[in-house]
Amino acid sequence: MGKIISICNQKGGVGKTTTCVNLSAALGILENKVLVIDTDPQANASVSFGFSSRRINNPALQFMDFVAVIKNNVIKTNSPNVDLLPFFEDLNFFKRTSEESKFKQALETISKLYDFIIIDCVPFFKTKNLDILISSDSVIIPVQCDYYALEGLHTFLKTIRYVQKNLNRNLEIEGFLLTMFDRRLNLSKQVVSYVRSYFKELVFNAVIHRNSKITQAPSFGKSIMEYDISSSGARYYLQLASEILVRNAKAEGLKEVSVIPEQKESIFNTRRFFKTLDPEERNNTLLEKFLKKSEANYENEKSPFIKNFDALIDLTKPYVEQIMGICYKNHFGNIWIYKINKSKIFKKKYLYIYFKDDIVSHYATKWFMN
């Protein structure tokens, strides 16, 4: 029986559909029979394989055998060993007529025909996604290597925990997939560090870097494997597919389900993200580096205020706001102004922070505001 994997995260733009399409293509190249199910009304997964969504207006379909409906509408794609069930605009797979949805009942039968069934979920959490998680064996959670991608992750993890405890005790976290990594940005490296430090072995070793070929492929109706299998983008997803195969081979026969402790769910509420880090882990954060670097400049001072602002250089706006708070003036521009009230400690009255491409390029302290 094949494994049913949903790719889900309630935040949009983190790479769910891209991962669904390219991971499926990579698994197919590695000689696995794969079915992709597109449940997103935007039908992006279908378009990425060169197909469009289908409109079915026949009300009688809701009384038909869903296994037969799926089999009759599966499309063979150009990717080796990959079939596609396009999004059905008017066909309600998720209407419950009993304790189990028709969707789950159908998947239990269809999964015998495939090694993997990969489900592309909608980018906002709805009852449909809940039903997909109930019907799945595991879930892949894409996490974009960006500050705002962490926002709301704790809420989704609570949903996963709820499903595991009450609705599908066999649901596993297949892994957290770090996407859109940019090696040029310290912020990307910091997000990777945070996620790995908290979820450890649950984070895939494979990291999906930003890659122009990955971005271009859907416009040609192709996966990255078809578009340019020699590209680094194709290599990232082949690494991911290989890692999933190895993990599942090692876990075969084991029934232990990965459950994230409740205290680790709330840590990714970004409003208190820095405050709740353990002391040992805080040593690796930009905030701790900032404080340590500043403390070295006023060892003999009793004041807790920062006297040197060199550590601000190369930080992004979200991190500056985490450290310094809301600025006194021009918060939405590229020059942030902070009013310095401790005149006995600071010789200057105002701190000017200059941004280029949302990263601190330099700063200046001035007695008067320009």
Image (cartoon, helix red, strand yellow):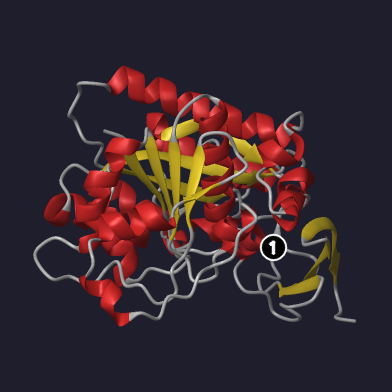
The residue that appears at 29% across and 73% down in the rendered structure is: 61
Q: Nearer the viewer, residue 79 or 227?
A: 79
Quadrant assignment, res 328: bottom right
- In the drawing, does residue 266 fall left or right of residue 349? left
Classify 10 Å Cα crowding around label 1: few (below 14), some (14-19), many (20 and above).
some
Q: Identify the residue under disc 1.
A: 317
The quadrant in which residue 356 appears is bottom right
**How many numbered discs sit on the rendered protein?**
1
Quick one: which residue is furthest to the top in this view?
250
Is 244 drawn above or below residue 359 in the view shown?
Answer: above
Outermost residue on the right side: it is 370
Q: Residue at x 34, y 19 (%)?
A: 249
Identify the residue shown where x is 28% and y is 63%.
130
Q: Position of residue 230 (x, y in %)?
A: 76, 28
From this viewpoint, is residue 122 visible? yes
User: Which corner quadrant holds the C terminus?
Assistant: bottom right
Residue 210, compared with residue 339, is above or below; it is above
Q: Give the image location of residue 103, x and y in percent.
A: 26, 59
Report if residue 211 is visible in the image. no
82 relative position to 175: left or right: right
Q: Is residue 198 left or right of residue 161?
A: right
User: Vertically, is 313 above or below 130?
Assistant: above
Q: Amino acid at mark 1?
A: Lys
Say which element carries label 1.
Answer: helix
Residue 357: percent from left, percent from top: 82, 61
Left or right: residue 166 compared with residue 269: left
Q: Position of residue 260 (x, y in %)?
A: 28, 43
Image quadrant occupied by the N terminus: top left
51 versus 2 height, above or below: below
Please name whichever residue, 242 or 189, is drawn nearer the observer in this view of the structure: 242
